[in-house]
Image (cartoon, coloured by chain):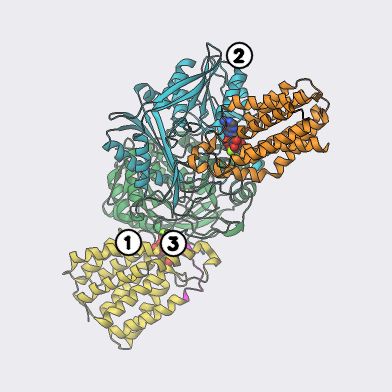
Chain colours: A orange, B yellow, C cyan, D green
Amino acid sequence: MVTQAQILQWLQVFASEIEQNKTYLTELDAAIGDADHGINMDRGFKKAIAQLPTVADKDIGSILKTVSMTLISSIGGASGPLYGTWFLRASTAVALKQELTEQDMLELLQAGLDGVLQRGKAQLGDKTMVDVLSPAVAAFRQALGENQGTVEAMQQAVAAAQKALEETIPMQAKKGRASYLGERSVGHQDPGGTSAYLMLKSLLAVLENY
Amino acid sequence: MVTQAQILQWLQVFASEIEQNKTYLTELDAAIGDADHGINMDRGFKKAIAQLPTVADKDIGSILKTVSMTLISSIGGASGPLYGTWFLRASTAVALKQELTEQDMLELLQAGLDGVLQRGKAQLGDKTMVDVLSPAVAAFRQALGENQGTVEAMQQAVAAAQKALEETIPMQAKKGRASYLGERSVGHQDPGGTSAYLMLKSLLAVLENY
Amino acid sequence: MKKLINKPEDFVRESLEGMAVAHSDLIKVNFNPAFVYRTDAPVQGKVAIISGGGSGHEPMHAGFVGRGMLDAACPGEVFTSPTPDQMLEAAKQVDGGAGILYIVKNYSGDVMNFEMATELARAEDIRVLNILIDDDVAVKDSLYTQGRRGVGTTVLAEKICGAAAEDGYDLLQIANLCRRVNLHGRSMGIALTSCTTPAKGTPIFELGDRDIELGIGIHGEPGRKRISFKSVNEITEILTRSLIEDTAYTRTVREWDEDKGEWADVELIDPPFVKGDRLLAFVNGMGGTPVSELYLVYRKLAQICQQQGLQIVRNLIGSYITSLEMQGCSITLLKLDDEMLRLWDAPVKTPTWRW
Amino acid sequence: MKKLINKPEDFVRESLEGMAVAHSDLIKVNFNPAFVYRTDAPVQGKVAIISGGGSGHEPMHAGFVGRGMLDAACPGEVFTSPTPDQMLEAAKQVDGGAGILYIVKNYSGDVMNFEMATELARAEDIRVLNILIDDDVAVKDSLYTQGRRGVGTTVLAEKICGAAAEDGYDLLQIANLCRRVNLHGRSMGIALTSCTTPAKGTPIFELGDRDIELGIGIHGEPGRKRISFKSVNEITEILTRSLIEDTAYTRTVREWDEDKGEWADVELIDPPFVKGDRLLAFVNGMGGTPVSELYLVYRKLAQICQQQGLQIVRNLIGSYITSLEMQGCSITLLKLDDEMLRLWDAPVKTPTWRW
Ligand SMILES: Nc1ncnc2c1ncn2[C@@H]1O[C@H](COP(=O)(O)OP(=O)(O)O)[C@@H](O)[C@H]1O
Ligand SMILES: Nc1ncnc2c1ncn2[C@@H]1O[C@H](COP(=O)(O)OP(=O)(O)O)[C@@H](O)[C@H]1O
Ligand SMILES: [Mg+2]
Ligand SMILES: [Mg+2]
Ligand SMILES: [Mg+2]
Ligand SMILES: [Mg+2]
């Protein structure tokens, strides 16, 4: 079971991961985009964290919804609607819950991914966060099918995400700003994929340690 | 006697001195002005030289007048009116002459200086071309008083000009763009003084060699 | 980084505060969420035109708010598209009952945020349509990219549609007009230097002393390719030929379908220019380029157009859609018809333009 | 050096050629000697206003030629004052029989060339007066310098005097008005970066990464002093205080005395600003500064003026008197009276302004 406290903890850890990797994410975006991904994410998640006290005793769905609304109104750019939608759909998937089963977790992750796909229309191989989120959800699902628990499944998901993130390097971007670079986008790791990996990694860290 | 041919020769030599020192004069002006003195002078004297064939068989006054008109309409800046006026007054001083006596030469140099003084209102010590032209004329006059010939008098004039030019270095500018620098103008050689020195030096070279 | 700013994170807000006090006769600025709107909004019975995008492109868009042009502009962070709440609140503020057109530049961020805003507005029964500007021929295809970016034509579309709204056009007419302007406008730009966003503090890309970036985007996104520095005549030739020789461009965009109440995919095709076309020629500076240099671009552009039998009947020369202090320029050619020409000439009164 | 130019020596001419084709409805350009003039010149019975100066300050002056402003502008080489033949020929072209005012910025080159032009025009029985603009408070004294330079007030004087000429003022009235505008206008600027003239090809001065030049001239002449980089609020404070706290400034200038038919030395005194003054506040960009940053300057300037009891009743924000691609800004404050205010608001139609 994933507790409400763990979810709150995860958001804190993710936000501080973003803060620590702000320059790194921005440099990744400088190479194939417009050098703002870390700045955007950090602005958004700082605001989101500031909202957490107002929902500290709410259910997980409400917490994620609040995060979603804050991200939507403070990140901007491509990642704002995408992360905003990820959290919005995730919140709907676990509405009113105080703790999450393995199955709830799968639905949360799947709903978030579906939201990103619908909003951004990217396909696998387009060199976006989808390339990281999608294999992660698949790995999580498979692990559950093999009767593993949430922590193990999340370990599989993060391992898959990490591998997938590296695989964005040789890809040629077909969505987002990086797509304008054509072949010149090859050889660089996708910034949005990187922040998505950090999101999953933070979640795992919390599940393992709290 | 200074011949009409020597005057023509002098203008050629001066123009090529300017061309060779274009960057030097501009760098001097960059330090305490707006980095265009060499460029201005080169543009003007190139044009003046191009006009010489049209006056090749004219008297010295007409030649200098043509140079003056060309300079006035092609140098611009501070040096345009000043060199233009120098040549205009010089031309009037030797109107209709085909060759120049020592006395004519003195009058030419004095008239040029007077023109510059009247147009520019600079005083000795203001760190301008006046600081070079004025001692040169004085030295020329004194040499004539000591019964020296044109070449010798011109040697004195150039020596005085060279010394005076170096003495512009410690001066604080009080006229022209360099005056805005206040104390910061100290320690730099005056660009207009430098071109004036080249003018006298070219004249001497022609008198000595042709 | 040397900029006339205080703290990087206050830059956009303080710039808007400056605009607000400077132009209080023309515009008002709302903060939290940030948008700039006409002092006389809402104008009852008039369609409202709203645009927006990342900051750093000034005077676009906030400088275009006023009579005869935009009703509101939504500025994002520097080079970062604004958020749906800005667009929604702006819509509520300026809605005069005749509906709202969102003019959206085709960048994934802008598109997604404006789509969310459209959905939110529709959910609150505000009538909103959205038209995409995607005129940057530096982006060749739409299959393997996000599609062409919205650049110079945006400025022209905002003027023309703003005049139409003032003239009493209804929402569908204006949406159609805006789509038409976009289909007939083509742009491409080059950068001589990079630019530095306040938040990053260092140049967003590196460009060698002898290199220029051909087909630069307005956010400093790298362009079509990097080429060695050339004379303005050669640069203008490259840009102009890219515009003139561009063939029909086909892509699918999402527009809101009012009848079905949902998004619909619409296929659009840009017709290429042909001899005899009457053009509006727009030579735009990237922010750090002196206007004197833009006239050299225009000079060559005019020569080429004349040789090609294209007739420039209007022009616009200046820095209107910029990338902070970037040096460089872009050229936009818009084929005008009588209606667009009339609307272009119509009166305008904004912080940037008054005629 | 990366610039949008062909050959450095063709830069000024080609830029003028671009202007000529771009604005053929408003201006014509004469070459050899170079000057820009109104298409409808000479306007019979109207005083003609002519200005000029080195190129590289665009849009000043050529961009200000047209109805309600200048009749002609004489562009010199970059940062080099134009020559008397340009000014004389321009005078002949635009003389409508009511006389001509030369508006001259106080630089030794400009002053001497315009003085020669005045003498030449007078010799040909063309009635010419000359008024100097010397508003740059960065230059403290006039005893040990060339006197204050002419900067931002020039732009305002050309607008106000142009409107007066259109209104039917006679030559003496306009000369007096121009002198009054100059006496009530004060300016000062800073540079964040140097600039590169096409002919020199390298930056005309060096400025460290953390330095700014305080009191910069528009030709990149070094300023009052070099200080370490500061926030825009601090910079604006320094500039504004320099303007507001400037005491009466006395100097002697040469003006043409029509009665005596010769030059006369005239003593002039700038009265300092006092509480309650109504001001036109002009925040000018040096050419490479984004307009978004200028609004931060204006924001702080407006705060200070309010604290000081100075009332800003008009403003102008943009890059109008520039130094090529230099980054930086200047502030000009002009005390307005009712007459100047009315003339400032009067219609204008030039390549730069239309209202
Ligand atoms: N259509 C899309 N679908 C999914 N992800 C996308 C899409 N467009 C962009 N992204 C992601 O967004 C990231 C860039 O985000 P960011 O830099 O914050 O926004 P912007 O591109 O507007 O500056 C990319 O690295 C990519 O992973
Ligand atoms: N009033 C003056 N009288 C005499 N010489 C002057 C005066 N003003 C400037 N100069 C000379 O002109 C030189 C600068 O010429 P130049 O750089 O061509 O013109 P500008 O200063 O207009 O750029 C100075 O070095 C100085 O010798
Ligand atoms: Mg980005
Ligand atoms: Mg000089
Ligand atoms: Mg961005
Ligand atoms: Mg000069």
Which residue bears the numbered disc 3?
B35
The span shown in magenta is: B167-178
Q: Which residue is at a point 80% across and 37% down the rendered structure image?
A: A208
Q: Residues within 10 Å of mark 3 (few under 14, many from 20)?
A: many
- Name the one closer to the observer, C9 or A164: A164
Q: Is residue B176 on the magenta stretch?
A: yes
Q: Are marks 2 and 3 on the same chain?
A: no
Note whether residue D223 is visible: yes
Element class at badge 3: loop
As measured in the structure, the alpha-carbon distance from the residue carrying label 1 to the one carrying label 2 is 70 Å
Q: Position of residue D12 (x, y in %)?
A: 35, 51
Which residue bears the numbered disc 1?
B43
Q: In the rendered structure, find residue C125 and report the number of the disc placed on it.
A: 2
- Name the one closer to the observer, B29 or C286: C286
In this rendering, the answer to whether D104 lies above or below C320 is below
The residue type indicated by label 2 comes to Asp
Q: Residue furthest top?
A: C259
Q: Earlier in the sequence, mark 3 or mark 1?
A: 3
- Name the one closer to the observer, D315 or D49: D315
- Name the one closer to the observer, A173 or B137: A173
Question: Taken as a whole, is the magenta stretch helix, strand or loop?
Answer: loop
Element class at badge 1: helix
Circles 1 and 2, Cβ within 8 Å, touching? The answer is no
